[in-house]
Image (cartoon, rainbow, N blue to C red):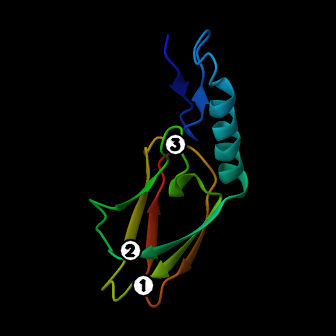
Amino acid sequence: MPSTYTTNTGIEKIATGEQSGTWGTTTNTNFDLVDQSTNGIVEITVSSAATSGSPNSLPITNGSLSNGRNFYIEFKDGGDLGGTVYYQLDPNDAEKVVHVRNNLTNQALTVKIWL
């Protein structure tokens, strides 16, 4: 049976008998993912407002560091965005606590998180 990943943070669950000789590398990556999920801080410079029907992505990528996994996310201007800025966690079935700071100049920010 191949490895699987946790739904909310994309941490690899090594299957029995898998990854002989590389188990330590995967485990160290998993520790980095846990660290990012519990203490990670990222600033995202927004370059596109997107739309409510097609929001920008905050990915939680299985097995690798990614912006959506961070504990604290700050959104900053990347130019004149023209209106409300939309983001969505991806995958949209991830359940996690995210602290968000809207540091955009004169723009509202909507972050979609489904529960």
Q: Residue at x 33, y 83 (%)?
A: 81
Location of residue 50 with respect to 90 vertically, above or below: below
Looking at the rendered structure, the kind of residue marked 3 is: Ala
- Can you identify the residue that label 3 sits on? 94
Q: Residue at x 36, y 87 (%)?
A: 79
How far is disc 3 from disc 1 in space, using C-alphas?
26 Å
Circle count: 3
How far is disc 1 from disc 2 in space, using C-alphas?
7 Å
Left or right: where 72 falls relative to 82: right
Left or right: where 76 falls relative to 55: right
Left or right: where 47 falls relative to 27: left
Tell whether label 2 touches label 1 (CB within 8 Å).
Answer: yes
Looking at the rendered structure, the kind of residue marked 2 is: Val
Considering only order in the chain, which callout, 2 or 1, is on the residue closer to the N terminus? 2
Looking at the rendered structure, the kind of residue marked 1 is: Gln
> How far across and how far down the image is residue 83, in percent?
33, 82
> How far across and how far down the image is residue 85, in percent?
38, 74
- Can you identify the residue that label 2 sits on? 85
Location of residue 113 with respect to 47 vertically, above or below: above
- Can you identify the residue that label 1 sits on? 107
User: Is disc 2 surrounded by few (<14), some (14 to 19) or many (20+) residues within 10 Å?
Assistant: many
Describe the element under mark 3 as helix, strand or loop. Answer: loop
Considering only order in the chain, which callout, 2 or 3, is on the residue closer to the N terminus? 2
Which of the 4 quarters of the picture holds residue 56? Answer: bottom left
> How far across and how far down the image is residue 95, in percent?
56, 44
Describe the element under mark 2 as helix, strand or loop. Answer: strand
Q: Nearer the viewer, residue 87 or 21?
A: 21
